Image (cartoon, coloured by chain):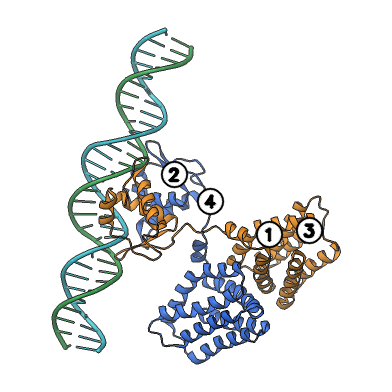
Chain colours: A blue, B orange, C green, D cyan
Amino acid sequence: MAPAVQQGRLAAQAAEVLLGCIRAGEWPLGHKLPGETTLAAEIGVGRSTLREAIRELAGQGVLESRQGSGVFVISTDIAEDWDVVLRRVSVASVIEARVAIEAEAAALAAHRRTPSDLRAMRRALARRSGSHHSAEEFADVDMALHREVVAASHNEVLLELFDGFVPRVRVAMIEMLKLRPIHDYEADQAAHSALVEAIAERDPAAASECSRAHLTGVHRALS
Amino acid sequence: MAPAVQQGRLAAQAAEVLLGCIRAGEWPLGHKLPGETTLAAEIGVGRSTLREAIRELAGQGVLESRQGSGVFVISTDIAEDWDVVLRRVSVASVIEARVAIEAEAAALAAHRRTPSDLRAMRRALARRSGSHHSAEEFADVDMALHREVVAASHNEVLLELFDGFVPRVRVAMIEMLKLRPIHDYEADQAAHSALVEAIAERDPAAASECSRAHLTGVHRALS
DNA sequence: GCAACTCTACACCTCAGACAAGTTGGGTTC
DNA sequence: GAACCCAACTTGTCTGAGGTGTAGAGTTGC
């Protein structure tokens, strides 16, 4: 049991250690874990900290504690949450998936956009062109525009997928903006404007290409 | 805040109380909860017990605690399951999303496929061409081939998304096959073969187009 | 011999208090 | 007005003490 715990909350690290033992097959399904005091000493954390780690895994449906009896493994593999997946994988993978979804959504939007969709996109575009004090603010108005485009596709699944990406992408975007601000702001805004115009003119190929080109640029900037 | 806690572990009861406040809208998304000491006193449990309750909800992805800052609501209700979303929306929406994911995955696969990927795809293709007794069996070998293609893109997010679609698509496909069997089986198999060959020859555009054409055909057949 | 009962050791559960580590906002200084 | 500093919070961690429930060993009665 490697107590190689270094970063973040101790309780979270302890949970990782426990999960590692379970995944490694050291504690199979139904197995009873060592006692709290023993385990806490082995991992090198206090008893309450270990208890919090156990609670965290209990919340995920991995462990179950029975008073007077012990703590047991009730699921060897956790139903991996979507957010957890996205936090684990590389930003590059997420952006590639965004290309897939947004390029297709842009093409569909060019077919199906209503006047109301168009108004919403242009409003979002205007807000994006305004002055922004922080990276957070800029990320938000940018994501809002992209979301309007996906919404204009009138495909609920694509929109749901996009929304699933938002939190992860937002964090990555803010990080990037703080490290390396957009150098050519005009060109960036023009690219987004071109996307909206392609949709306005009902040109699926152009819309798809605009979206793809922009995201490919983001992909390059991040790698 | 009704401290009507009576049965089972106090920590679990406290978690229920917290979840109740969240569900009732008392603490909306992003809201900061009262301090641990305050909250513990209000609910009528010790601070460590309250902390375990918070950990339990954190494990479920409902709360997030930031040291020095506070505990925040990050999800107003348990993440709506993909299966639930996909059952609600139309098959057409799902297929459009499949086009987005699989066409992009096919293009990436054409870039990144390894010899091992290629072998797996050809094996799946061969199994698909064999004789099949039931619609269920055919649906399974078909999905297996499509999955191999997405896997060859070496993008974990796309693969995860595809897997999320599988159950819903499988049901729809079996339904369709029973109502209206594939009339030109040879052409259908040839289309899949062409997709694999395009990936084998590292032709992203062709691979993407094969995938898109095939799925568009399915889309048409269903509407 | 076997079943039922009792009891003890051990498990988790809860609490209280203390201190460490991090964040936030206001006041001070230049 | 901007940069800095500090104090008052916040959550994070540890310890020690009791409470409550379980399981198994030991005993008892048939």
Element type at mark 2:
strand
Image: C3 above or below A171: above
- Measured as percent of width and height from the top left, residue A180 is found at 44, 84
Identified by mark 3, the residue type is Arg
Q: Which residue in the protein does label 2 denote?
A: A64
Between discs 2 and 4, the one toward the N terminus: 2
- Measured as percent of width and height from the top left, residue B160 is found at 59, 62
Q: Local crowd at mark 4 within 10 Å, few (<14), some, or many (≥20)? A: few
Q: Are marks 4 and 1 in contact (CB under 8 Å)?
A: no
Q: How far is the residue under mark 2 from the one under mark 4?
A: 14 Å
Q: How far is the residue under mark 1 from the one under mark 3?
A: 17 Å
- Measured as percent of width and height from the top left, residue B214 is found at 76, 69
Question: Would residue A181 be found to the left or right of residue A194 on screen?
Answer: left
Q: Are marks 3 and 4 in contact (CB under 8 Å)?
A: no
Q: Which residue in the protein does label 1 denote?
A: B169
Front residue of A51/A18: it is: A51
Question: Would residue A75 be found to the left or right of residue B129 on screen?
Answer: left
Q: How far is the residue under mark 4 from the one under mark 1?
A: 24 Å
Q: Given the image, what chain letter belongs to the residue carrying mark 4?
A: A
Question: Would residue A12 be found to the left or right of residue B189 on screen?
Answer: left
Element type at mark 1:
helix
Q: Are marks 3 and 4 on the same chain?
A: no
Which picture quadrant has residue A217?
A: bottom right
Q: Given the image, what chain letter belongs to the residue carrying mark 2?
A: A
- Measured as percent of width and height from the top left, residue A194 is found at 58, 88
Q: Tell me what residue is drawn at x 52 percent, y 88 percent.
A: A188
Q: Which residue in the protein does label 4 denote?
A: A77
Q: Which residue in the protein does label 3 denote?
A: B128
